[in-house]
Image (tube, rainbow, N blue to C red):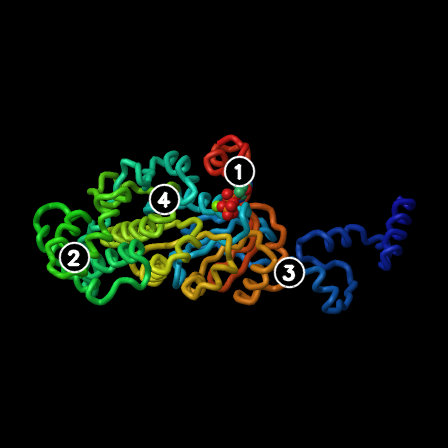
Amino acid sequence: MDADTESLISIGREHLCQFSILRYQQEDGLNTVLPYGLRRIAALRTLTTESVAVLMPFRAQEIQDPGGICYGVNAISNNLLICDRKKLISPHGFYLGVSGSGKSMGMKSTVENVALGTDDDIIIFDIEREYGPLVRAFGGEVIEISPHSKHHINPLDVADDYDESESPIAIKSELITGILEQQMGAGTLTGSHKSIIDRCTANVYKAFRGKGRAPILRDWRNEVLQQPEPEARELALASEIITEGSLNVFAHKTNVNTHSRIVSLDLYEMGDQLRPTALVVALDYVQNRVIENRKQGRFTWVFIDEVYLYFKYHYSAEILYKAWKRFRKYGGILTAATQNVEECLQSETARLMLANSEFLMLFNQAATDRRELANLLHISDTQLGYITDAEPGHGLLRMGGVLVPFSNVIPKDTDLYRLMNTSPGQSR
Ligand SMILES: Nc1ncnc2c1ncn2[C@@H]1O[C@H](COP(=O)(O)OP(=O)(O)OP(=O)(O)O)[C@@H](O)[C@H]1O
Ligand SMILES: [Mg+2]
């Protein structure tokens, strides 16, 4: 006992602490030490702020919204991060990070949690053909949009619940203008062209009212052919390739189950020529769906991977930005992922969208992007550490004004991992 006492005292002395012995007070000493809140020993000591700070338990910021979904665990406290984006002013989100940092995995993990934890609808823009296995595993529909696919979506389908303030004809004629602008080159459409487009769109919808089906692009082109103006001939010629020619993917009646709860739009095989049109048509389909869902009080989650493809084309960027602004009130929650933060921040539209998104998941960042983001979001140096050389599935999560380091690692030996993994060489 004496030897033990002696060695304790000497260990204390090494660390500049002075121990004294409680003679005949062992029981009081023990009761004081145990966490009963009793003080049986008349020894008090004044502590400076510095020493008190050492004894304080570490305080970490947490996000645990009732009814939210899980985005991983807090890297500091290991508590679950449960976020309810629906309660944010703007529920839209971005997943940013370098290639291979885990953005797509993160999106898939969110898709999984929304699919299992809510009754909301899910629509995915799959540019790299990587969401198919997951979507099929959840019983969803994969719609392949490509020049030789049997799946068709008719861009002229209308939802019957547009806002009173917006007429479907105006929206559709804008859509057709957009599609033709992609074909004819930006800036080539004059006022006369636009008037003819608008007139024909109105005519064709009037002719089809009560027919039980929406017009298709071919009907629209036939209407254009009836117009006397020379500009109409130009329009008919420009639209030939997308109605009769080799790019006629969008010139048929919708023949896929676009009403499945989970839908993935596979745009992988779209070449450069059709991609912008495909993106615009797909987003228009999503818009119809979101409007319908609002009628039923359903939320719609829209996931767009590799969103920079949208920003490349003026018209699709514009449409996406509009969606970003108006989807919230329709119960639409948009989530976009991209690697090119710097490139994104150069686009004014993308910047505005980023500013309009209160939910961000930042994965491992390249040095230049990190600096930009630190400025934009006021991230401290310590916090920057979490997005510097971070492992896949780790980073910073920002929700409203709260910034929390997260970790969301999906164990490799699970079926979920096999459904989500994109690394070549690892079995799917
Ligand atoms: N949360 C995670 N848990 C476990 N492994 C992960 C996680 N996230 C990513 N990985 C691993 O990293 C690989 C690449 O991830 P992911 O496809 O999500 O990258 P990305 O950020 O979308 O890249 P890119 O920009 O090239 O599409 C995955 O296939 C997987 O092996
Ligand atoms: Mg990816």
* Label 1 SS: loop
Contact between labelled residues 3 and 2, with CB atoms less than 8 Å apart: no
Q: Which residue is mark 3?
A: 382
State the residue in front, 410 or 375: 375
Q: Which residue is mark 1?
A: 423
Q: Which residue is mark 2?
A: 201
Q: What's the residue type where badge 3 is placed? A: Thr
Residue 293 in the image, given as x and y percentages of width and height: 26, 51
Residue 311 in the image, given as x and y percentages of width and height: 41, 58
Crowding at dot 3, Cα within 10 Å, few <14 / some 14-19 / many 20+, comes out as few
The alpha-carbon separation of the residues under discs 2 and 4 comes to 26 Å
* Label 4 SS: loop
The alpha-carbon separation of the residues under discs 3 and 4 comes to 43 Å
Q: What's the residue type where badge 2 is placed? A: Thr
Q: Which residue is mark 4?
A: 270
* Label 3 SS: helix
